[in-house]
Amino acid sequence: MTYAPELQSLNNRPLPEWYDAAKFGVFIHWGVFSIPAFAPQLGSISDAFKLEYDRAVAMVPYTEWYANAIKVPGTPSAKFHEEHYGNAPYENFKEPFLEALKQWDPAQWAETFRDAGARYVVLVTKHHDGFCLWPSAVPNPHRHGWHSGRDIVGELAAAVRAAGMRFGVYYSGGIDWTFNPEPLRTIADFVGSVPGGDYPRYAMAQTRELIERYEPSVLWNDIAWPTKLDELLPLFADYYNAVPDGVVNDRWPHVNWGTKVMRTKVGRRIFDLIAKRHIRRNPDALDGMIPPVVPHSDFRTPEYVRFSTIQSKKWEATRGMSYSFGYNRLDREADYQPSEQLLSDFIDGVSKGGNLLLNIGPRGEDAQIPQAQLSRLRDFGGWLRRNGEAIYGTRPWLQAEAETADGLSIRFTDKGGEINAIVLGRPAGEELRIRNFNFAGRARRLEDGSPVTLHQQGDDLVLGFTRPLAGDFAPVVVMTPEA
């Protein structure tokens, strides 16, 4: 089917089945920012805005925002840069990053992601610092040669596809500090910094170049889009016509009157006053980030957020294993989320209609993935090899959650009419009681197929195990309803 650059045509397009079935993808934040690999550790990005609003953009835990942070005097990043690199410009990190590529093995990365159970991989091809990980033929008018000579995007795409996974590209369409180099401190500064002038043409040309060269299965834009809607819709239509089973995310707020207001000092000042007052009065409202609704997208992308209910719109949770996406040299084992918590969040998301795009941040100095991240990928792979049938290709059931009499959470998925009950914990013993839950049918353990008896006791369902639970994390019981 051919799609037209019109909302009716684009919004009537069904979500490609592969994406809904995939459930788990790997995100990669890796670039010249991975050489300094530094950001302050105040907690989450939300904590930075709560604690340091007036300079929060330069205080976030995201190392990939280092190029901006060092422009703001007195910040930890500025002090770190001065102590370790003196007055050296950010551009100086290009050469050591490219030199370290001699140690990069894209096939090994792809095998690692496949073994972790990922079904797709999304690479950051250009982040806010504007550096491109492919030899772009679109010249940057403000920084000559600000790209890799080696085709990192193409090599990883080939390796990922050879390993049986889909490949996608991230592109920072809304922010590029080579076009707008002013230091950013507040939310208003950030939102109002979407470049105009020659940038919209540049961003459009590069995005089309990525589509033509690599035919990505995922087109993942970030922050905003620098053109009006009537210029954006042809991009979507051309992408779908070139990649029939491709998907686009929701971070495409196009230029409108609000964009123009936020480009003025008065508009930004008013916005900041309102934002600071809102955060002060509602501190818990700023936990994670959910992008605004846009005219067209295939899926939503909440960041460091869990939904409490099943969502009607397809969504993809995105997060780092720590509070940063890019590698932070300050992170220690305790700064990374435990594997079981990451898995619990993943299972919770799947039960509510979501995917997980779990980020890794490789080191810049040697192009290697840190052990703390590798260990969590291995844990994902081990659990999914045993229990992937309860995840891949599933859809939400009538209800997402339940609880055992011992207080353990349960999540449900539906696959072909069979209901998977996944216990988020380490239950042990011969019996499990699900509170306030009614079900009639038969059941079995997913891992070994051993029978599980079902017995209703009042409002509770009691599961009896012929092979006792041994305390393994997140065991799965497959329940088949009565015909």
Image (cartoon, helix red, strand yellow):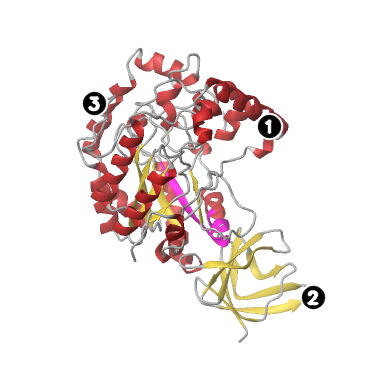
| Horizontal side of residue 220 vs 93, given as left or right | right
User: Is any part of residue 329 visible from this angle?
Assistant: no
Q: Looking at the picture, how far across and down is residue 299, in whole percent?
A: 48, 54
Q: CA distance from mark 3 to mark 2?
A: 73 Å
Residue 225 is one of the magenta-drawn residues: no
The disc label shown at residue 278, or none: 1
Residue to which mark 2 is pinned? 458
- Position of residue 450 relative to residue 85, above or below, is below
Rate crowding at label 1 as few (under 14), some (14 to 19) or many (20 or more) other CA atoms within 10 Å.
few
The amino acid marked with disc number 1 is: His
Q: In the image, which residues are magenta?
A: 346-360
Rate crowding at label 3 as few (under 14), some (14 to 19) or many (20 or more) other CA atoms within 10 Å.
few
Q: Residue shown at 35%/12% (left/top)?
A: 87
Outermost residue, right side: 458
Q: CA distance from mark 1 to mark 2?
A: 47 Å
Tell me the element at label 1: helix
The tally of labels here is 3
Tell me the element at label 3: loop
The amino acid marked with disc number 3 is: His
